[in-house]
Amino acid sequence: MKKILIALVALTTMQITIAQDNRGTFSGGFESNSQWYQDDEGLGTMAPQDQLRSNNYFTLRYSYDKFTAGIQYELFAPNPLLGYFEGFEGNAIGTYYLNFKHEGLDITGGHFYDQFGSGLIYRSWEDRQLGIDNSIRGVRVKYDFTDYLNATAFTGNQRVGFEISDGTVTGVNTELDLSTALDLETGIQIGASYVNRFQSSGSPDLNFPADIGAYSVRADLTFEKFFIGTEYVYKEPDAFVLNNVVSNFNYQNGRALLVNTGYATKGLGINATIRAIENMGFYSDREQTGNPFLLNTINYVPGYTKQQDYAVSNIYVYAPQALVSPIEGKAGEIGGQVDVYYTSKKGSLLGGKYGTKFEFNYANWSGLDATFDLTNNTYDASLLSRGEKYFEEYSIAVKKRFSSNFSTIFTAVHTEYNAAIIEGRY
């Protein structure tokens, strides 16, 4: 993508309740993101022919008794902002839905968003600033059997611009709160999920996997000042997509393990996350694997690193490596981060009159230790192994107030960043 100087950036948002009486409630909102592009002689880049571009979203909702209906009209004039999926060109109704709720029953038809567990197996979401909308268009049913047991089922196709995906996504999720069911003081929640992607294929291989299922089990434990949660995901063997070409007679499964733990008491908080993933790209259209706009993405694999407050420390941000690439020697990743927050008491030596806050973060990510067969585009890897380092960062921040009018923030960051792996450049 060309680097273009943005001379003007405008963001407008508005939420309003239009009417509210015994006939129901109307409400809506409007958001507009506009940019004016100019030539940058220093970089030697030229602005696009349509220098003014604007992304606009208008939503309207109506609620009456047990029913809620919504619609979102979108206008990209004359084209979407640079860096956004070009399929958003023009204007049309982007999403719509009708929802019915009664006691423990919740039914939605049309577009909807949801998440199972941490999202490693399924997450549909919208982020207008990033140009992401992975909503499902179909039917979703959730039912609360009791105050400690519920289940969700859905089926449909993902949104892709103003169209929908070729593949059909179906999922089932259940959540059980054992602490409520057994009246325990310790919090214990367990869950299980299944998500399937069906997409037909013209492959000459009679065993080509058109149906791909993923399974997830998880548990969370909380007692007093400590918590720990873990989730394991298994994805059935799927076809490799290398250089936009779908491979035949060559299929690999995927796995993921996530552990979150933490401790909190007055003045001190510690959080740690460890995750290992292998071949966990999961798309409703297999041919869109690895696309830069996150189109057709069924699951959610975030980068577990600290979100720094300042621009300089955000230049080199880690991007998770969930896909397999035998040519690049990538089969997945393993790593995690630790956050420590400490507040010294007011009146103490470190705290002074107003107290002092200390923040420490350490993050480390590496590739899996794997062996690759480049001739056949296959590999063998261990999920709990470490190979080449991808990213490592230490950071510390000290926040100190000296008076009601004067405060300071001291930040130090050390980052090691493997640009060849993360960005594909040297």
Image (cartoon, rainbow, N blue to C red):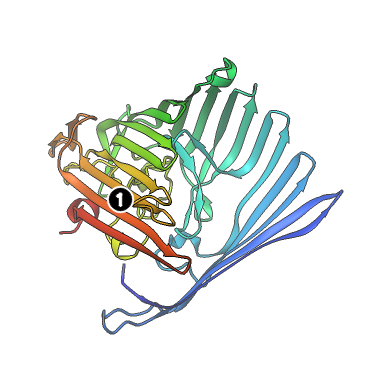
Which quarter of the rendered picture does the N terminus lie within? Answer: bottom left
Percent position (x, y) of residue 416? 19, 53
Picture quadrant where residue 91 is located: bottom right
Residue shown at 48% from the left, 25% from the top: 191
- In the image: residue 359, left or right of residue 420: right
Picture quadrant where residue 49 is located: bottom left
Residue lying farthest right? 22
Answer above or below: position of 361 versus 107: below
Percent position (x, y) of residue 157? 52, 42
Can the viewer see residue 395 in this picture? Answer: yes
Percent position (x, y) of residue 103? 73, 29
**Crowding near pointer 1: few (<14 within 10 Å), some, many (20+)?**
some
Percent position (x, y) of residue 382? 20, 29
Front in this rendered view, residue 185 or 310: 185
The amino acid pointed to by label 1 is Ala
Front in this rendered view, residue 228 or 75: 228
Picture quadrant where residue 113 is located: top right
SS state under label 1: loop
Which quarter of the rendered picture does the C terminus lie within? Answer: bottom left
Q: Which residue is mark 1?
A: 319
Can the viewer see residue 213 in this picture? Answer: no
Front in this rendered view, residue 341 or 318: 341
Front in this rendered view, residue 218 or 131: 218
